[in-house]
Amino acid sequence: MRFSVRLRPIVALSAAAVSVLLLAGCAGSGGDASPTASGSASAAVDLCDARAASGDASKAVSVSGDFGSPGTATFTAPLEVPALQSTVITEGSGTPLKAGDFVSYAMTAYDAQTGEKLGEVGYNPAELLPQQVSADSPLGQIFGCGAPGERVVATFPATQSAAGQVYVIDLLSTVPTAAWGEPQTPTDGLPTVALADSGAPTITLPGGDAPTETTLETLKKGDGYTVQSGDTVLVQYTGVRWSDGKTFDSTWDKGGVPTNFTTTGVVAGFQKALEGQTVGSQVLVVIPPKDGYGEGEINDKDLKGDTLVFVVDILGAQKTPAQSQGQ
């Protein structure tokens, strides 16, 4: 069972308060992600300490099935769940999580009162957007400083609007905060891009007039899911004006933390840079005013009249509910 009527509210922000927190951002807010990523030793310690304790409820759940596939949970219902509890079923390997990491995960959900399976999500591409973990986030409290490959049973207590819930959650991977695709041969005559060690781009404009049509160039070709119209994307980006080469907006200048929005929630030129591209790709796009913020006199107050140049790293995607239900 995938994306049933019962599961859909969990994916698109469940009525249960804990699920709202768990999947916050999956539907795409268009705002900046938070908290700011941190790689400090203290942050790592805090994340380890943040893991919820194992308890009678989470220990009472038996799980079968392979990691990376929907887990089958067996328990005696109704299951009394007094608090968030987390029990590791399978240990992960590799680099432990640290606060600020983005993770890819999948989960199977059950009703703690009835034992009924509510559904599963995240086991197929673009069903869940990568999420950032912190000591204050539910995913951080479930996984702590676990490593990719970890499978956990998490039990959530009931709220006024929903029964308690049991999740089997797989920590699939950490997600880079810069594009990881295969570098492509640049096109002559377009802006050039130099990357810092962090992945932050510096854009150098060519001489001559700006293109009059939206012009795309794939700088790195990812091997992931192909973004569709209406999808929510997780991205890093930098934008400069063609008129003076100055940066007017950049996630890299805001702490280097990716943000998310729908492909249909941005100007037409930016939308063209996203749709049809694969996750893991880095795209250069030159956007004339007609596909940007409209014609008019160029000024310092807004972007009207200016041709814009963006470098966009596509780090993750989540399908629209309609696309997911059609699978």
Image (tube, rainbow, N blue to C red):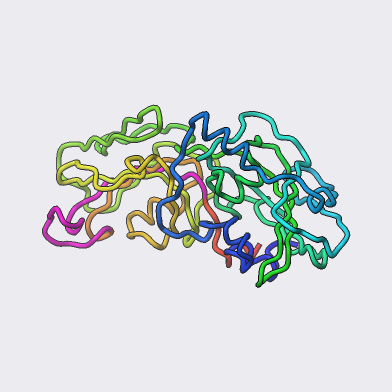
x%, y% of residue 96?
A: 62, 32
From the image, which quarter does the C terminus lie in? bottom right
For the point 38% across and 51% down, the residue is: 273
User: Is 166 contained in the magenta span?
Assistant: no
For the point 49% across and 32% down, the residue is: 39
Instruction: Relative to 65, say whether 206 is above or below.
Output: above
For the point 61% across and 29% down, the residue is: 95
From the image, which quarter does the N terminus lie in? bottom right
Side of 132 where 3 appears, left or right: right
Q: Quadrant of residue 116?
A: bottom right
Instruction: Relative to 99, say whether 294 is above or below.
Output: below
User: Is 303 contained in the magenta span?
Assistant: yes
The residue lying toward the viewer, choosing from 210 and 265, is 265
Q: Main secondary structure of the magenta part?
A: loop
x%, y% of residue 291?
A: 28, 59
The magenta segment is 292-316
Side of 129 where 246 appears, left or right: left
Looking at the image, the residue that sits furthest to the right is 76
Side of 228 where 273 appears, left or right: left
x%, y% of residue 3?
A: 68, 64
Side of 126 where 186 appears, left or right: left
Q: How many marks?
A: 0
For the point 55% across and 35% down, the residue is: 98
Q: Quadrant of residue 151?
A: top right
x%, y% of residue 21?
A: 57, 58
Instruction: Relative to 170, say whether 270 is above or below.
Output: below
Looking at the image, the residue that sits furthest to the front is 82
